[in-house]
Amino acid sequence: MKASSINWLLVILVFGLFIIQGYWIAHSLIGKVPPVTVLEAKADKSEIVYGEPLYVWITSRRLRVCLTNTDRFFFHGNDVIHRERVVGISAKPGATITRRVRVQLPTFMEPGEYTFRATLFSDCGSGVVYATEQPEVAFTILARP
């Protein structure tokens, strides 16, 4: 074998090792990065009349498609007064989207100050379930006029 042939073989071998290492790094990062990030959450109106729904604008970025369920929490002070699960929220990966979500309030919530929080649970089929917190949204329920 000529020296130039050996040099080319070494170049291809080294180049191949860099490619394999790059795939390994990318694959190892996929398991550590949550598939969805919630960038912002804010109420359409900070004051709503008793019996009206709460509308929340949510801006999020999805990196990959995974089954995502959302647990919604309503707080009065520091106490959780209601929890519910919404099954199967999805979005197109790679995009940053803003959407207006209608949140029906439990009928027992009387006039007062409350906080809405949500946690997204994403299952990408790897055996790891990612939990992503949504920023909290403060709102006030007013008595009917």
Image (cartoon, rainbow, N blue to C red):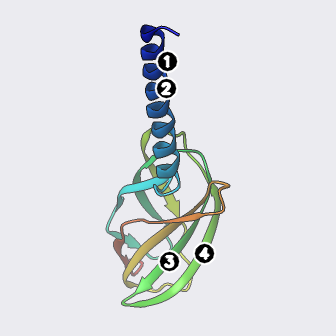
Dot 2 or dot 3: first in sequence order is 2
Looking at marks 3 and 1 on the same chain, the residue that comes earlier in the sequence is marked by 1
Q: Nearer the viewer, mark 1 or mark 4?
A: 1
Q: Nearer the viewer, mark 2 or mark 4?
A: 2
Mark 2 sits on what residue? 13
5 lies above or below 61 = above
The residue tagged with tag 3: helix, strand or loop? strand
Res 73 label: 3
What residue is shown with label 1? 9
Tell me which amino acid carries mark 4.
Glu
Confirm or deny contact between disc 1 and disc 2 (CB under 8 A): yes
Q: Is residue 92 left or right of residue 15?
A: right
Left/right of residue 18 with respect to residue 87 in the rendered view: left
Image spot of residue 8 (x, y percent) = 45, 14
The one of 134 and 48 positioned closer to us in this rendering: 134
- Look at mark 4 in the image and give the residue it sits on: 84
